[in-house]
Image (cartoon, helix red, strand yellow):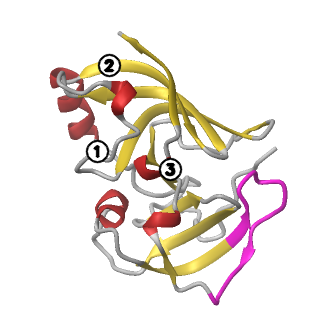
Amino acid sequence: MAGAFNPASRATPAGGRARLPGHFVVLTNDSRIDAVLAQGGVRLADALERRAAINVNNVLLGPNDGSRPLTPAPSIKSVDPRTVIIAMPAEDGDPVVSEAEHEAWHEWRVTYVVTLEATPFKVAGTLLLLPSQDPFLLTELGTTLFLPVFSPTVEVGEVTLTDLRHDAILVNRSHLRRVRNATRH
C-alpha cells in the first residue's frame, strides 16, 4: 500500500503541519514525483495549464503505486505537464481548487459521480460540470487540460492509493481513455 511521505513538511510549534505552498505530487505512467514549484505564488492548476515544463525543487521520486519509498532525485529540475496523468497537492500543500471556487461551482454546475480510466489509473469521484458539458465527451480535449475530480479514489493495478488528498485531484484529459460511468446527482 502507498504511504504518505513528505520530508519537506515541517512541524509547527503547536504540533500541526506548516503549509508549504506549491508542494505537490504527480503520478505518471510509471512514477510518483513529490516536488515543490520553483516559482512561488503560482497555483499548481495554473502551472499545469500553461502546458510548459514546470520548474521544481526538492524532488523525490518513486513508483506510482507507492510500493517503494520515495528517494531524492536531485537531477530532476522540471516536470512536463504532458506526462502527468494525475496531479494533487501534497498533504501540506495548497488545495487545487479553493473553497470559494468549490462553493461557486456547486451553485452553478451539475454534479456527476464518475469512474474514469486514465491508464494505468482508475479514478472514481465527483465532477462538477457546466450544464452544457456531457461527461462522456470528456475524452475529447477541451479548453482546459486538467479536470478536477472531487472526493477521489484512485487505483493503479490492484492497489488503491491511500495517501491521496480527499478534497480534489487533477486528471489530465489527454490521458483519459474512457468515462466508464457517470451518474447525475
Query: On the image, numbered disc 3 is attached to which residue?
Result: 175
Give the residue type that dot 3 points to.
His
Query: On the image, numbered disc 2 is attached to which residue?
Result: 111
Residue 123 — which label? none
- Report the residue at 69% width, 53% height from top: 4
Q: Farthest residue in the bottom direction? A: 75
Give how far apart the Cα atoms at labels 1 and 3 are.
24 Å
**In the figure, is residue 123 to the left or right of 182?**
right
Query: On the image, numbered disc 1 is attached to which residue?
Result: 98
Give the residue type that dot 1 points to.
Ser
Say what secondary structure mark 1 lies in: loop
**In the figure, is residue 127 to the left or right of 178?**
left
Q: Circle 3: is it few (<14), some (14-19), or many (20+) Cα within 10 Å? A: many
Magenta region, residue range: 61-75
Magenta-highlighted stretch: main secondary structure? loop
Q: Is residue 62 magenta?
A: yes
Between residue 54 and residue 139, name the one nearer to us.
Answer: 139
- Report the residue at 28% width, 38% height from top: 99
Give the residue type that dot 2 points to.
Thr
Question: Is the residue 76 above or below the residue 159 in the image?
Answer: below
- Report the residue at 32% width, 19% height from top: 111
In front: label 1 or label 3: 3
Chain-order first, disc 1 or disc 3: 1
Question: Is the residue 138 above or below the residue 30 in the image?
Answer: above
